[in-house]
């Protein structure tokens, strides 16, 4: 499907609570579609990382500068006429709406959904990440699932990574104005 030359490229936010696989799935989607991947955790202000590392949940006030920085990354990619895949928990609808506004509407979400037990086991197994498993429950309490929101693809995480990526890419074909998503 072709788009007008003036149209901005699509950005994709891979979202969900910690431990759902945002980074791995996001990198996979980006690689399959020739898009740049940005690890959203790297955009957190140092104070946020320190707070989470101490097991203290972030507040809306803590998250807003981070969300705005993610919005800046999306705008930079669009100005350069590049597609972008970025990981971001995007736990609340207000956060997703803030990102949609930054993207001028040219934004899709891949929501990675799974059981608390699966995410907890993944968090406990990973090495060197600042986010302790003790914060999973606060993220689950904050999460407002994007059920019924336009431009959202929901994928279960209880399968192999390649299968998750393939399902996400297939779903993005249905929400993307810009073509090019490879599901194979």
Image: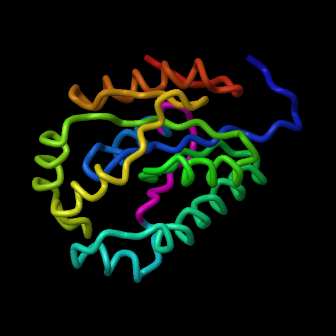
Comparing 26 with 153, the one in front is 153
Comparing 76 with 53, the one in front is 53
Q: Is residue 152 left or right of residue 158?
A: right
Residue 98, x across and y down, in percent: 63, 54
Residue shown at the point (71%, 51%) measured from the top left: 101
Is the residue 83 above or below the residue 168 in the image? below
Residue shown at the point (37%, 39%) measured from the top left: 25
Q: Is residue 62 left or right of residue 34?
A: left
Q: Quadrant of the N terminus?
A: top right
Residue 43, x across and y down, in percent: 49, 68
Q: Is residue 101 magenta?
A: no
Q: Is residue 35 magenta?
A: yes
Is the residue 129 above or below the residue 12 in the image? below
Residue shown at the point (47%, 50%) measured from the top left: 92
Q: Quadrant of the C terminus?
A: top left
Specify start and end residues of the magenta stretch as a single range. 31-41
Residue shown at the point (72%, 41%) measured from the top left: 105
Comparing 145 with 167, the one in front is 145
Comparing 173 with 133, the one in front is 133
Residue 18, x across and y down, in percent: 29, 53
């Amino acid at each position: 499907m072709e788009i007008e030359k003036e149209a901005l490229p699509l950005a994709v936010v891979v979202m969900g609570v910690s431990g759902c696989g945002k980074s791995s799935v996001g990198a996979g989607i980006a690689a399959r579609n020739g898009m740049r991947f940005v690890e959203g955790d790297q955009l957190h202000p140092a104070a946020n990382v320190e707070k989470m590392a101490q097991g203290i949940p972030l507040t809306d006030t803590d998250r807003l500068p981070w969300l705005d920085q993610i919005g800046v990354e999306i705008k930079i990619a669009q100005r350069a006429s590049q597609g972008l895949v970025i990981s971001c928990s995007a736990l609340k609808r207000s956060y997703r709406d803030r990102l949609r506004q930054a993207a001028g509407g040219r934004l899709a979400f891949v929501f990675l959904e799974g059981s608390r037990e699966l995410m907890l086991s993944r968090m406990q197994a990973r090495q060197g990440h600042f986010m302790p498993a003790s914060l999973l429950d606060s993220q689950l309490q904050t999460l407002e699932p994007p059920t019924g929101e336009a431009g959202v693809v929901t994928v279960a995480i209880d399968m192999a990574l390649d299968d998750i990526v393939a399902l996400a890419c297939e779903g993005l074909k249905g929400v993307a104005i810009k073509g090019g998503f490879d599901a194979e």
